[in-house]
Structure formats: structure tokens, C-alpha cells
Image (tube, rainbow, N blue to C red):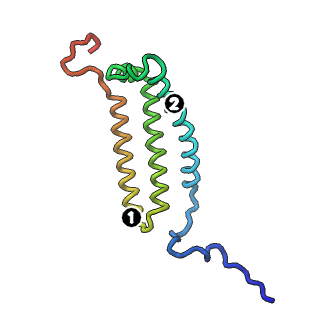
């Protein structure tokens, strides 16, 4: 009677799925934790945004250029929208990064896709931040007293 000892787990994995030595960093654990925490924060931010814009006051009929200008004149709403922008973009980027890591087989493909993802994320975050903080409600040639 012979006893068969199963192969160690590392030998049971098909070589095409191995991606090199494991790193000792805890980046993936921190990314996982960020997804959970940012998800909770986004729920609060998004529902606060929807309630303040659609339920309080005149609802959807009140939303206009002037409504946004009035909101962004208040630093609290600037911070609120900035936090929503940053968290949503970083949350989405982290999710897409995980999908790229899971489904892109070649290292070069992963590198290109993640490079494009990071450039697009940086572009949108910088552009959105600039819009929030440099928004000027006064149109050129306006005769409004506050302009």
C-alpha cells in the first residue's frame, strides 16, 4: 500500500498563469481596503449630492448654470464635488487596474493598458480639479453687478 503525497500548491498551477516572484509589499491589500472605504464614502457623497440637488428646493427644475455657480461659490460644495471626483476616479481606476491584471496575459499588454489608464485618470482628475477651482460664473461682457 503506497501513499501518494499531493504536489505542493506551487507545482499545481499551470506555468502560463505564473507571473513572477511574489512581492513583499502590501499594495494589493491596501488597494482592496481602499475600494471598500472609498465605496462607502462614495455612497455618502453621491446620495448627499443627489438629495441636495434633486430633492431639496425645486428639484431638477432648479438645476442650471446659475445653480452650479451658486453651489461652487461655497467652499464646502467645492470640496464635496472635488472629493466625489477624486474618489470616483481613483475607485474606478483601481477597479479597471484589477481587471487588467486579471485578464491581460502578456506583461507588455498589461503595461500599455495600465499606462493608458493612468494617463487618462490623471488627465481627468487634473481637468476636473481645475474646473472646480477656476470656475468663473461671469460670462465675458456680462453686466451683472457681481461681475
Residue at horizontal 54 percent and vertical 35 percent from the top: 43
Q: Residue 132 at what x, y percent from top left?
A: 36, 30
Task: Read off the residue under disc 2.
Answer: 47
Hey, which quadrant is residue 57 in on the image?
top left
Q: Secondary structure at mark 1?
A: helix
Quarter of the image for the N terminus: give it. Answer: bottom right
User: Where 6 falls versus 139 (above or below)?
Assistant: below
Residue at horizontal 54 percent and vertical 32 percent from the top: 44
Lower position in the chain sequence, tag 1 or tag 2: 2
- Position of 47 with respect to 78 (left or right) is right
Mark 2 and mark 1 in contact (Cβ < 8 Å)?
no
Label number found at residue 109: 1
Q: CA distance from mark 1 to mark 2?
A: 37 Å
Hey, which quadrant is residue 39 in on the image?
top right
- Position of 116 with respect to 96 (left or right) is left
Q: Mark 1 or mark 2, which is nearer to you?
A: 2
Q: Residue 89 at what x, y percent from top left?
A: 43, 43
Quarter of the image for the C terminus: give it. Answer: top left
Residue at horizontal 38 percent and vertical 52 percent from the top: 117
10 Å crowding of disc 1: few (<14), some (14-19), many (20+): few
- Position of 113 with respect to 14 (left or right) is left
User: Where 83 falls versus 96 (above or below)?
Assistant: above
Residue at horizontal 38 percent and vertical 58 percent from the top: 113
Q: Is 133 in front, or is 60?
A: 60
User: Where 43 falls versus 62 (above or below)?
Assistant: below
Count how many numbered circles sit on residues in the image. 2
Q: Residue 51 at what x, y percent from top left?
A: 50, 25
Amino acid at each position: 500500500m503506497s501513499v501518494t503525497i499531493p504536489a505542493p500548491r506551487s507545482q499545481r498551477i499551470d506555468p502560463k498563469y505564473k507571473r513572477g516572484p511574489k512581492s513583499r509589499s502590501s499594495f494589493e491589500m491596501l488597494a482592496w481596503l481602499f475600494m471598500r472605504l472609498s465605496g462607502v464614502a462614495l455612497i455618502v457623497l453621491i446620495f448627499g449630492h443627489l438629495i441636495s440637488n434633486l430633492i431639496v428646493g425645486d428639484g431638477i427644475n432648479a438645476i442650471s448654470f446659475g445653480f452650479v455657480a451658486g453651489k461652487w461659490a461655497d467652499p464646502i460644495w467645492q470640496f464635496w464635488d472635488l472629493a466625489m471626483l477624486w474618489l470616483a476616479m481613483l475607485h474606478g481606476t483601481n477597479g479597471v487596474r484589477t481587471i487588467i491584471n486579471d485578464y491581460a496575459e502578456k506583461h507588455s499588454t498589461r503595461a500599455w493598458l495600465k499606462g493608458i489608464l493612468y494617463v487618462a485618470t490623471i488627465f481627468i482628475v487634473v481637468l476636473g480639479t481645475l474646473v472646480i477651482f477656476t470656475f468663473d460664473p461671469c460670462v465675458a461682457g456680462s453686466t451683472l453687478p457681481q461681475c
